[in-house]
């Protein structure tokens, strides 16, 4: 099976062009030689509605998918097609999309899920438990929607999902738009993540790097407890090898093994100063942060529910502004 980053690159090689909310770009430079290959296009609005269409040899557009199979207003049940264990507490859950359709999720966005059975997952007040997740499958990937989910001992939703069997269903609603990423809007982008909070950052960087016109340099600072906890490491290493001048990753472990050559401890002020572009770059730099609430608060201040909240923490101390920082 190809990795999802590889899938995105393969789609790029077939001249895929994605146009999402307030953005438009070509994934690779068009060939100077005539070609009969269709030029695929996709549009995804903030409601997740859009479509695939292509220009045939006569220049006429032919619609192949009018909208996302997901619904931003209502929950819909989707069949769990396959479960792929990732490590000791995390698995990939691949859900089947009808009619081999693509999700058309804009970048960056997430979905929310709940149990298909109303009685299966409720809180202390009897209300359904609803949790957000960011898919790791590209928005143009046909027929499947993949979630990478870590099982937490005190996480009722994650335990419910890990208890599902292939053929079961999960109720999904979305997309929930987050940050409308636009190609080459910034010269430098820092991605600061912790644990399973890596998925929104993965969504952005794989989306951006698969675009042949990308000029933005991405630096990922990724903290975990142990080396076994590092999610998507092989994907990040592949990106680093393929885009050595546009992507770098720095791993930080709380409990490093013997012989560990990466950083140890936590993402400190000094680590950020060493690896992240300075705030003095103003609108040319953006910092995305996603991780456990305590880590986000220490780095960038607490979120105010679904809103950003005031900027605080280390990034504020280093002079970054609210316009330069986004908290997932």
Image (cartoon, helix red, strand yellow):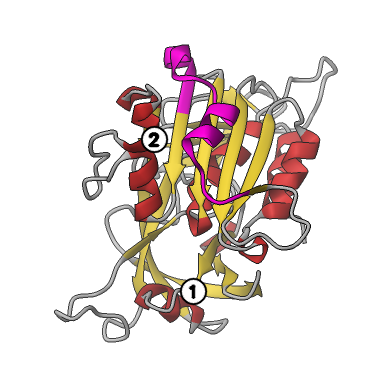
Please indicate whether residue 240 sits to the left or right of residue 284 in the image: right
How many numbered badges does the structure rendering display?
Answer: 2
The range drawn in magenta is 264-286
Q: Nearer the viewer, residue 312 or 87?
A: 312
Q: Is residue 170 visible?
A: yes
Please indicate whether residue 114 sits to the left or right of residue 306 in the image: right
Q: Nearer the viewer, residue 241 or 208?
A: 241
| Residue drawn where x is 45% and y is 74% of the image | 152
Outermost residue on the left side: it is: 125
Q: Is label 2 in a helix, a strand or a loop? A: helix
Please indicate whether residue 225 sits to the left or right of residue 243 in the image: left
Q: Assess whether residue 283 is covered by the magenta stretch.
A: yes
Q: Is residue 139 visible?
A: no
Q: Answer above or below: position of 242 versus 104.
A: above
| Residue drawn where x is 37% and y is 21% of the image | 319
Q: Is label 1 in a helix, a strand or a loop? A: loop
Bin the neighbour count of mark 2 within 10 Å (Cα to Cα): few under 14, some 14-19, many 20 and up: many
Disc 2 target residue: 314
Which comes sooner in the sequence, label 2 or label 1? 1
Outermost residue on the right side: it is: 33
Question: Dividing the image into 4 quarters, which one contains the C terminus?
Answer: top left
In the rendered image, which quarter is residue 166 located in? bottom right
Give the image location of residue 268, x and y in percent: 49, 40
Q: Assess whether residue 201 is covered by the magenta stretch.
A: no
Disc 1 target residue: 151
How far apart marks 2 and 1 lie (CA) works out to 29 Å
Q: Nearer the viewer, residue 153 or 298?
A: 298
Give the image location of residue 139, x and y in percent: 54, 46
Q: Answer above or below: position of 189 versus 81.
A: above
Give the image location of residue 61, x and y in percent: 58, 30
Q: Nearer the viewer, residue 253 or 289?
A: 253
| Residue drawn where x is 56% and y is 58% of the image | 254
């Amino acid at each position: 099976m190809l990795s999802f980053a590889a899938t995105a690159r393969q789609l790029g090689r077939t001249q895929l062009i994605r146009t999402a909310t307030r953005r438009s770009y070509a994934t690779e430079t068009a060939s100077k030689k005539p070609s009969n290959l269709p030029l695929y296009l996709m549009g995804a609005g903030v409601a997740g509605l859009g479509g695939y269409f292509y220009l045939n040899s006569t220049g006429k557009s032919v619609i192949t998918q009018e909208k996302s199979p997901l619904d931003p207003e209502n929950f819909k049940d989707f069949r769990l097609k396959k479960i792929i264990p990732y490590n000791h507490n995390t698995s990939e859950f691949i859900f089947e999309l009808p009619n081999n359709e693509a999700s058309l999720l804009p970048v960056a966005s997430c979905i929310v899920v709940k149990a298909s059975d109303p009685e299966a997952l409720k809180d202390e007040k009897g209300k359904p438990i609803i949790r957000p997740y960011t898919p790791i499958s590209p928005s143009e990937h046909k027929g499947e929607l993949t979630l990478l989910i870590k099982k937490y001992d005190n996480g009722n939703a994650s335990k419910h999902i890990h208890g599902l069997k292939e053929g079961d269903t999960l109720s999904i609603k979305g997309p929930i738009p987050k940050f409308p990423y636009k190609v080459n809007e910034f010269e430098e982008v820092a991605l600061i993540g912790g644990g399973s909070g890596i998925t929104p950052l993965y969504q952005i960087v794989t989306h951006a790097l698969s675009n042949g016109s990308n000029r933005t340099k991405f630096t990922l600072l990724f903290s975990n407890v142990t080396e076994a906890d590092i999610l998507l490491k092989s994907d990040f290493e592949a990106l680093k090898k393929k885009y050595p001048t546009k992507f770098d990753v720095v791993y930080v472990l709380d409990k490093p093994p013997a012989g560990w050559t990466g950083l140890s401890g936590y993402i400190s002020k000094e680590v950020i100063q060493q690896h992240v572009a300075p705030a003095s770059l103003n609108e040319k730099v953006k910092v995305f942060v996603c991780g456990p609430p305590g880590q986000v608060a220490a780095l960038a201040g607490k979120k105010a529910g679904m809103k950003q909240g005031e900027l605080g923490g280390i990034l504020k101390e280093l002079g970054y502004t609210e316009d330069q920082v986004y908290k997932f």
